[in-house]
Amino acid sequence: MATYEEVKDIPNHPEKYLFDVRNESELKETGVLPASINIPLTELEKALNLPDEVFAQNYGREKPAVDAVLIFSCKAGGRAARAANLASTLGFTNAKAYAGSWTEWQAKQS
């Protein structure tokens, strides 16, 4: 599991990836986590299977290596856990969910 402190420190760790798996409409309502890449859960498997150059074009960042730290966030943690499990099944060895997700982030930013 990823912690609030780890997610807050993501901008200082370019070797780590923070994926927000909420839908775009949710992001417009609430805002985004700093340094996060939005890939809705329904598109995640396809995105993580893209060729490296296509991933970079689509998301503005190199495709993560299979041993990169991948942190997944959503609204309350459920989709983040499913996303981390999906990434693990695709061979990513350091995938984890931010259990508190947007709900915790927003509460601690107040």
Image (spheres, rainbow, N blue to C red):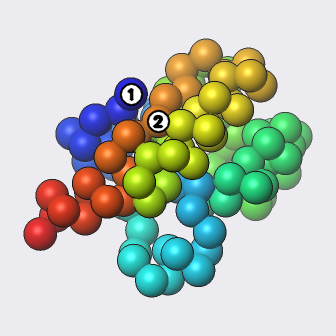
SS state under label 2: strand
* Quadrant of the rendered image containing residue 106: bottom left
Residues packed near mark 1 inside 10 Å, few (<14), some (14 to 19) or many (20 plus): some
> In the image, what residue type sits under mark 2?
Ala
Taking the spot 44% from the left edge, 47% from the top edge, the residue there is 77
Tell me if 46 is positioned left or right of 15 in this view: right
> In the image, what residue type sits under mark 1?
Met
Taking the spot 32% from the left edge, 46% from the top edge, the residue there is 100
Residue 1: give its label.
1
Tell me if 50 is positioned left or right of 69 in this view: right
Residue beneath disc 2: 97
Image coords of residue 27 (percent x, y): 50, 74
Quarter of the image with the C terminus in it? bottom left
Image coords of residue 98 (percent x, y): 40, 40
- The answer to which of 84 and 17 lies nearer the viewer is 84
Q: Is residue 108 visible?
A: yes
Image coords of residue 96 (percent x, y): 49, 29
Q: CA separation, marks 1 and 2?
A: 5 Å
Discs 1, 2 touching: Cβ within 8 Å: yes
Q: Residue furthest left?
A: 110
Q: Is residue 1 above or below residue 71?
A: above
Residue 82: give its label.
none
